[in-house]
Image: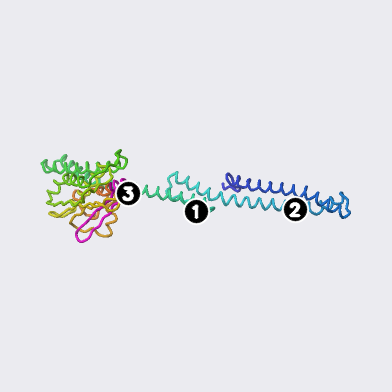
Amino acid sequence: MKRLVPTGIAVRVALACLLVVALAVVIIATGVLEVARAQFEQLMMKHGLSSTEANAMFQQTVSGIFAAAVVVATLLSIVVAVVLARYISRPLEEVAAAASRLARGDLDARASERGPVEIRALAQAFNGMADSLQGQEQSRRDFVAGAAHELLTPLTNLQGYLEGLRDGVVPQSQAVYASLHEETERLVRLARALLEMADAPSRIESPERVELRRAIESTVRLVAPAMDRRRIAVTINVEEAVAVRAKPDHLTQVLVNLLQNAGRYAQVGGQVSVRAERRGDAARVMVTNSGPTIPAEDLPHIFDRFYRVDKSRDRSSGGHGLGLALVKQLVEAGGGELGADSAGGLTTVWFTLPSS
């Protein structure tokens, strides 16, 4: 049932207003009815009236008017107190109601931004929090949907092969077992990538001074077999004595993912280059590969989880869409920035880290 009388803070505000009025009336009454009475009697007695006559005149004029003024002031103060109390309490009640809805899972709950400036600021902060929670929930749903979609393809392939082997439709052969092994490896890679994304920011490791040239050369050696299989030439151009403050394992993960991604999308017999240079208080690393140009509308999204520039690309050749998302997570956790440029058959993914 709707409340007709303000409660809680509204009552306290109204009572505080009435208390102020009551104190004002007491002070004024003391001054008017006591001090002013004595002054009035003395003045009237100087003009020949007796004390009794002066007092009677005072009661008929000043006291009556004062009593009427007190009644009017009290009524007006009650009205003002109730209006003020509702002006303050209603926005707070709306914020509380929106918070209650949000706690019950209604992520669309928002509070009206009205009332005193402090309450408007509270409502704005609440709405900002609600927007953030809604965005996080949408990201979680998108992530779960993307992960399920990525898992579904290899699992469906495995199921088809196993049912075929069970029913005798698919003959046992090394090629079949190789396909089963390939699909299993794909699931393992996806599971590891998911675990790395969940674990990377919280991994206990302190930033250290890392020489970029040494770290890049070491990473290039790690990916060299995959590059050699596709006849991709890798060049390194790093300024001398360029170092960064970073977590070594995180930096290695970033470089491995960028190089693997560059090698995957470079054409057979193409080129991949890695450059690094100091820019003010940061060092910038750029990994460039020859190959198809990324459309401008896709470029801002390549760091999103499970995003694919070529939607028709096969999962085995196109990856699982988590490599660059992990790079973004690790670089930003290390206090750096990243971005990408693509034009004229060359694509560059770059990132910065604080220089040492």
**Badge 1 density bin: few <14, some 14–19, many ≥20, Cα 10 Å:** some
Q: Is residue 250 left or right of residue 267?
A: right
**Magenta stretch holds residue 331:** yes
Which label number is shown at residue 68? 2
Three-letter residue code for mark 1: Glu
Of all residues, the one furthest to the front in this rendering is: 241
Task: Give the x, y percent position of residue 192.
Answer: 24, 41
Three-letter residue code for mark 2: Ala
Describe the element under mark 1 as helix, strand or loop.
loop
**Badge 2 density bin: few <14, some 14–19, many ≥20, Cα 10 Å:** few
Q: Which residues are magenta?
A: 329-356
Describe the element under mark 2 as helix, strand or loop.
helix
Q: Is residue 51 left or right of residue 289?
A: right
How many numbered marks appear? 3
Q: Nearer the viewer, residue 289 or 297?
A: 289
Marked residue nearer the N-terminal end (1 or 2): 2
Label 3, on which residue?
Answer: 142
Label 1, on which residue?
Answer: 113
Three-letter residue code for mark 3: Asp
Residue displayed at 76% across by 50% down? 32
Q: Nearer the viewer, residue 162 or 320?
A: 320
| Proximity of marks 2 and 3: CB atoms separated by less than 8 Å | no
